[in-house]
Image: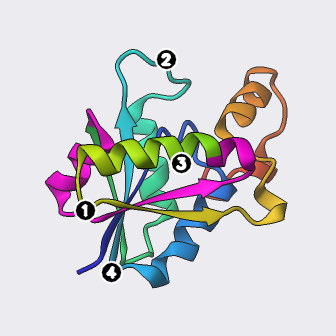
Amino acid sequence: MRIAVFPGSFDPITIGHVDLIRRAVPLFDKIIVAIGVNNQKKYLYPLEQRLDWLQSVFALDDAIFVEHYQGLTADYCNKVGADFIIRGLRNSSDFEYEKTISQINTIISEGIETVFLISKPEFSHISSTIVREVIKGKGDVSRFLPKEIVI
């Protein structure tokens, strides 16, 4: 069975994330959308809210599962039997950062392969960081979020 993990904070999940995850479904038997919890990081939305959002967005997708974890993503992959990590690339900066993380994950956990999917042009400008800034500024983010999420 080909199991992949799509890790992230999803604070909040964007339409760009959803597009990447759904595009990855034909490549794997099971995709775990996993919220990585970092106690040192300050989130805009609590873990429970983010989990609820993910579960509502992917409720009808039989191959997509929602979980959360603490610690290293490579260790979590080993725990759930995943051989693949899915990452999205919006630009060359994302590539440089993700390439380094991928190489570290390969050293930490032999056998884990990172699969990069390039964002579609219409989503390449969307990031959770920018969406959070618009939310903090009381702007309309509905065009950047899945329809299941109302802020």
User: Residue at 55% of width from left, 36% of height from top?
Assistant: 11
Spatial distance from mark 2 to mark 1, Cα to Cα?
Answer: 32 Å
Give the amino acid type for the residue marked by disc 4 in the picture.
Asp
Observer-nearest of 41 and 51: 41
Q: Amino acid at mark 3?
A: Lys
Instruction: Tell me the distance, in whole angstroms, between the alpha carbons under discs 3 and 4.
Output: 24 Å
Q: Is residue 103 magenta?
A: no
Disc nearer the start of the sequence (1/3) = 3
Badge 3 marks a residue whose secondary structure is: helix
Q: Are marks 2 and 1 in contact (CB under 8 Å)?
A: no
Residue at mark 1 to residue at mark 3: CA–CA distance: 16 Å
Residue interval drawn in magenta: 70-95
- Circle 3 residues within 10 Å: few <14, some 14–19, many ≥20: some
Question: Viewed as shown, does residue 151 lie left or right of 104?
Answer: right
Give the Cα separation between the discs numbered 2 and 3: 25 Å
Q: Residue 134 appears at what percent x and percent y?
A: 79, 29
Q: SS for tag 2?
A: loop
Return the residue at label 3: 99
60 in relation to 131, above or below: below
Location of residue 120 with respect to 48 vertically, above or below: below
Foreground label between 3 and 4: 3
Asked whether the viewer can see residue 55, the reply is yes
**Mark 2 Cα within 10 Å, few/some/many (few <14, many 20+)?**
few
